[in-house]
């Protein structure tokens, strides 16, 4: 039995030096250009003091996603009002955030956050950052490919 194992080992080692030489495959690096947003969804509702609301949406292809707080109105002082605007993945009955920013209604002309994402299902979340003194009506524009 020991002779057979030794012979098999010797045979496998002697065959390792035979055959054609191999070259490593060339590495091709491709840079994919993110698709621009082609559609806009609106996520709106009423946000209670201390509350969180989220909305799920689908991104069809690798591309740029913009979230913009377009309105925040109510009995809260508009000069101090702000909410936390987040982006993440749906998880159970919530949204698991990967990114969040403080958004003020006085800066509604430009996106509050711009991200490049793979195709998939994502969620936008609005949370009272502690600045609301009364329920507020909000609107968020979600632009994506």
Image (cartoon, helix red, strand yellow):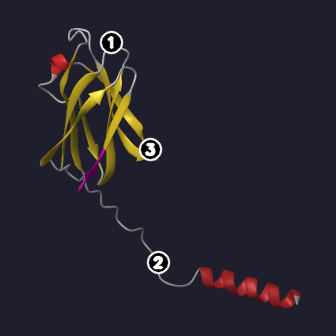
In this view, the residue farthest toward the right is 1
**Is residue 39 left or right of 102 when viewed as pictured?**
left
Q: Are marks 3 and 1 in contact (CB under 8 Å)?
A: no
Numbered label attached to residue 93: 3
- Sequence order check, earlier mark of 2 and 3: 2
Task: Give the CA separation, mark 2 to mark 1.
Answer: 74 Å
Mark 1 closeness class: few <14, some 14–19, many ≥20 residues within 10 Å: some
Looking at the rendering, the stretch of residues picked out in magenta corresponds to 56-60
* Residue topped by disc 1: 133
Q: State the residue at coordinates (16%, 16%).
A: 106
* Residue topped by disc 2: 21
**Is residue 118 left or right of 64 when viewed as pictured?**
right
- Above or below residue 95? Residue 127 is above
Q: Secondary structure at mark 3?
A: loop
Q: State the residue at coordinates (40%, 21%).
A: 50
Q: Position of residue 116 (x, y in %)?
A: 26, 43
Q: Secondary structure at mark 2?
A: loop
**Is residue 7 left or right of 16 when viewed as pictured?**
right
């Amino acid at each position: 039995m020991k002779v057979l194992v030794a012979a098999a080992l010797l045979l496998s080692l002697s065959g390792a030096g035979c055959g054609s030489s191999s070259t490593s495959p060339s590495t091709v690096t491709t840079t994919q250009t993110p698709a621009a947003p082609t559609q806009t969804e609106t996520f709106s509702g009423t946000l209670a003091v201390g509350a969180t609301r989220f909305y799920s949406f689908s991104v069809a292809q690798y591309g740029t996603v913009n979230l913009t707080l377009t309105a925040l109105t109510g009995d809260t002082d508009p000069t101090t009002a702000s909410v936390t605007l987040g982006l993440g993945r749906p998880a159970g009955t919530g949204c698991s955030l990967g990114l969040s920013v403080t958004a003020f209604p006085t800066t509604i002309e430009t996106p509050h956050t711009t991200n490049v994402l793979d195709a998939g299902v994502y969620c936008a979340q609005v949370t009272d950052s502690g600045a609301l003194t009364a329920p507020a009506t909000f609107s968020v524009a979600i632009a994506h490919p």
